[in-house]
Image: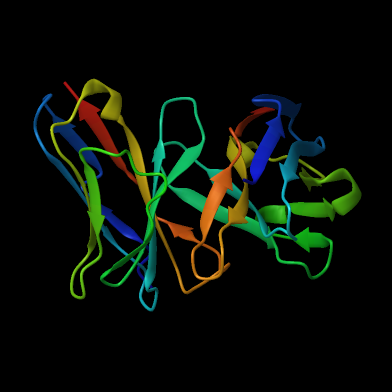
């Protein structure tokens, strides 16, 4: 049974470029969550999606960040015009529904040069 | 908004000793509580969860946690530490209205095991 798959594991971008992070949930999971972990900090919620719908984006920065979970394919977290402060580990989690345990991927470590 | 406080960013114990990692939460409704473990360069792995059933919850790898409503605590324990327990541990509470859920994490506690 495949777990939550995130790719790439490591991503290096220069300031001003775009970063695209992908997440394929566990089989049978229709709820996807994105979290960001800054160095020496805990995880902070960013966005919660179900297929083709954004349910809660209260943790997303107002600008440059967007997320989608299309009918077909993985969920995408997109960061436009990256800045140094975007350097972090980005984790995706999936679950089967409300208050069910969230299962995490191994994360994408984004480094901005 | 709910919040989670983990007392002690670093805890060090000897191999074979008791492990106690502290977690206090604030919540206006009965909470769903979780403990996760994170090994270096990996994602979070669920250790155990509390969902308003038994107050003493047993998890994987010999860990357990006790929900104490009067103390708003959900401390994680293991009777005898093993070297492989060295990792970072996160306590989390779920927050959100029906159908819209997110996890609120504590700052984490890094557990070191001394031989």
Where does residue B23 sit, x and y in percent of width and height? Answer: 73, 40
> Can you say whether B9 is above or below B96 in the image?
above
Residue B115 showing in the rendered view: no
> Can you say whether A102 is above or below A34 in the image?
below
* In the displayed structure image, the side of residue B8 where residue A79 appears, left or right: left
Hey, which quadrant is residue A101 in on the image? bottom right
* In the displayed structure image, the side of residue A46 where residue A11 appears, left or right: left
Please tell me which residue is depicted at 79% across the width and 70% down the height of the picture: B53
Where does residue A97 sit, x and y in percent of width and height? Answer: 49, 73
Q: Which residue lies furthest to the right in this view?
A: B70
Where does residue A24 sit, x and y in percent of width and height? Answer: 28, 64
Hey, which quadrant is residue B24 in on the image? top right
* In the displayed structure image, the side of residue B27 where residue B68 appears, left or right: right
Q: Residue furthest front?
A: A62
Residues B93 and A13: in front is B93
Hey, which quadrant is residue A15 in on the image? top left
Where does residue A105 sit, x and y in percent of width and height? Answer: 38, 54
Residue A24 showing in the rendered view: yes
Please tell me which residue is depicted at 69% across the width and 40% down the height of the picture: B82
| Quadrant of the frame with the N terminus of chain A | bottom left
Q: Which colour scheme is used?
A: rainbow
| Quadrant of the frame with the C terminus of chain A | top left
Count the marks. Answer: 0
Please tell me which residue is depicted at 50% across the width and 61% down the height of the picture: A102
> Can you say whether A56 is above or below A40 in the image?
below
């Amino acid at each position: 049974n495949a777990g939550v798959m995130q790719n790439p594991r490591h991503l290096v971008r220069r300031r001003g470029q775009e970063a695209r992070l992908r997440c394929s949930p566990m089989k049978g999971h229709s709820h996807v969550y994105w979290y960001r972990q800054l160095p020496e900090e805990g995880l902070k919620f960013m966005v919660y999606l179900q297929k083709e719908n954004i349910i809660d984006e209260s943790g997303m920065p107002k600008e440059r960040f967007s997320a989608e979970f299309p009918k077909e394919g993985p969920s995408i977290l997109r960061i436009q015009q990256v800045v140094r402060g975007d350097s972090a580990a980005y984790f995706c989690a999936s679950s089967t529904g409300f208050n069910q345990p969230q299962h995490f991927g191994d994360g994408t470590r984004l480094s901005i040069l | 908004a709910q919040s989670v406080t983990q007392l002690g960013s670093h805890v060090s114990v000897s191999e074979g000793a008791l492990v106690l990692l502290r977690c206090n939460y604030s919540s206006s409704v009965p909470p769903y509580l979780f403990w996760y473990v994170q090994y270096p360069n990996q994602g979070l792995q669920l250790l155990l969860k509390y969902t308003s059933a038994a107050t003493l919850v047993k998890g994987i790898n010999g860990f357990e946690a006790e929900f104490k409503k009067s103390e708003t605590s959900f401390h994680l324990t293991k009777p005898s530490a093993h070297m492989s327990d060295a990792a970072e541990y996160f306590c989390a509470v779920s927050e959100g209205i029906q159908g819209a859920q997110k996890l609120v994490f504590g700052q984490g506690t890094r557990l070191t095991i001394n031989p």
